[in-house]
Amino acid sequence: MYNPRWRNKAGRISLFMMLLTVLLAGLWTGPTETAQAETASEIGLAVYIVPVKQTVESGLQSFLERAYKEAGEANAEHIVLVVNTLGGKVINAEQIGHLIRSSDIPTTAFVEGKAVSAGTYIALNADHIVMQPGSTIGAAAVVNGSGELIDNPKTVSFWVKEMMESAQLNGRDGDIAAAMVDPNVELKLQDKIGRDKQKGDILTLSASEAAAVGYSDYTASSVNDVIKWLQLEGRTQVEVNPSLAENVARWLINPLVMTILLVLGIAGIVIELLVPGFGVPGVVGLLGFGLYFFGHYVAGFAGIESVVLFIVGIALLVIEIFVPSFGILGLLGTASLLTGVVIAASDPMTAFISIAVALVAAVLVIAFVVRRYKSKGIWNKFILRDKLTTEDGYVSADAKDSLLGLEGVTVTPLRPSGTVLIGDNRVDVVTSGEFIPAGRKVRVVKAEGTWVVVKEWIE
């Protein structure tokens, strides 16, 4: 039978899906590339000044990819990376190093403060290294998230090799790069910097020490001094800085923030589907997933395919509610949704961990909400809660209580059940066990509900 409540629920679901699509489509416009200067034909030769002043991670990698792309499109003559970082993730440092090496535009790394760990690797890939007085470079040992040295031989050997090759790429001493990574390396440097690199130490060089060993090509106090040393005075200087969207995205792709967004997204959407009424849970869920994809898109990791998979997954889960498929649509929807989330992330393993944590947290939130609002859940539409009791006015068949004491005539023999004519009505009856032939007079001695008991009546 048609139930108008289903139409209302379907309407809310349709509105929910429409808003989800509009929100993600709106976010999908992505960051507008900042107009840093006129086109190359208007400004002539230019030097692009690009800051590297944050943790080396996916957000920095995405920003530098944009900066190098803009410089290439403008036919820039030179790129100056202003480096002041304590390092970060090796995987992103590798990608940034490859970006610098493969660029047709010469790059100079100006170490303005610290080029530590992954920052050292980035600087070593530049064509020139210029250091500010008081700055340092080195301390590139591989550490874990707690800052403790990783002594895995394979990991250390790999990073030592990467550092050495980057140093040798531009004629620098590869052994010094190795000494910046491996505490087991010993190196005689007394005659150059007044001290040797001892076993157990990690080499770090000051600006003057770096110049003495050939790791710094020049010492400059400012970017203008660097440009003057490069003999590029008079060129238009174009400063490329992270946009607001990129700064926001950098925060959004933080593993902790990413996990919180997934918790809000999963819990919000599931609660909205289970508890009638489009409201706060649905909006929170949309914002959670929308911000997740927005951050990863701006950071350069999410593509249109990840959003399509996500929307398809949500659609399949909604269809599963109305079209039972023995769980097939539900499984496909879940797989599609999770795949969209994972491929949008920079690191699949980090994404899997975030999803696992988010699922556990979301289940707890959903369980609390379902328990709190169990009387309003969609599951109530599938459960028959009415009791067909006499007190509520329900009668399963005609009651025979009114026949008690009435007399009738047997129409059929009672063996011990049969039919009796009482007035104008044929009534199915039974005896207490005795046999009564047809045509005999009987009286109703017991009537409970539909149970009628008669006894032969002799006047």
Image (cartoon, grey):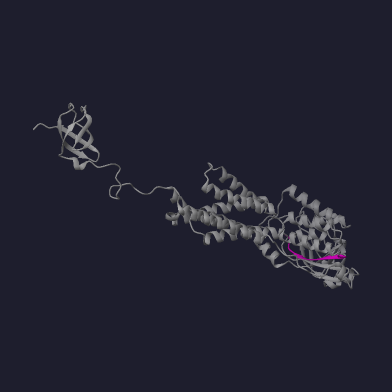
299 vs 132, nearest the viewer: 299
- x and y percentages locating residue 352 in the rendered image: 63, 50
Question: Left of 44 or right of it: where is 398?
Answer: left
Q: Quadrant of residue 404?
A: top left
Query: What residue do we see at 77% from left, 49% from top?
Result: 158
Query: What residue do we see at 84% from left, 62% from top?
Result: 72
Magenta stretch prevailing secondary structure: strand
Position of the C terminus, as image quadrant, is top left
Query: What residue do we see at 19% from left, 28% from top?
Result: 433
81 vs 407, nearest the viewer: 407
In the image, is residue 56 part of the stretch drawn in magenta? no
Q: Is residue 41 above or below residue 336?
A: below
Say whether residue 263 is visible: no
- x and y percentages locating residue 329 in the rendered image: 57, 44
- x and y percentages locating residue 424 in the rendered image: 20, 38
- x and y percentages locating residue 259 in the rendered image: 60, 56
Query: What residue do we see at 17% from left, 36% from top?
Result: 444
Question: Left of 109 or right of it: where is 312?
Answer: left
102 vs 41, nearest the viewer: 41
Q: Quadrant of residue 268?
A: bottom right
Name the residue furthest right. Answer: 231
Name the residue furthest left. Answer: 459
In the image, is residue 83 part of the stretch drawn in magenta? yes
Q: Which residues are magenta?
A: 76-87
Say whether residue 270 is visible: yes
Count of all numbered marks drawn on residues in the image: 0
140 vs 356, nearest the viewer: 356
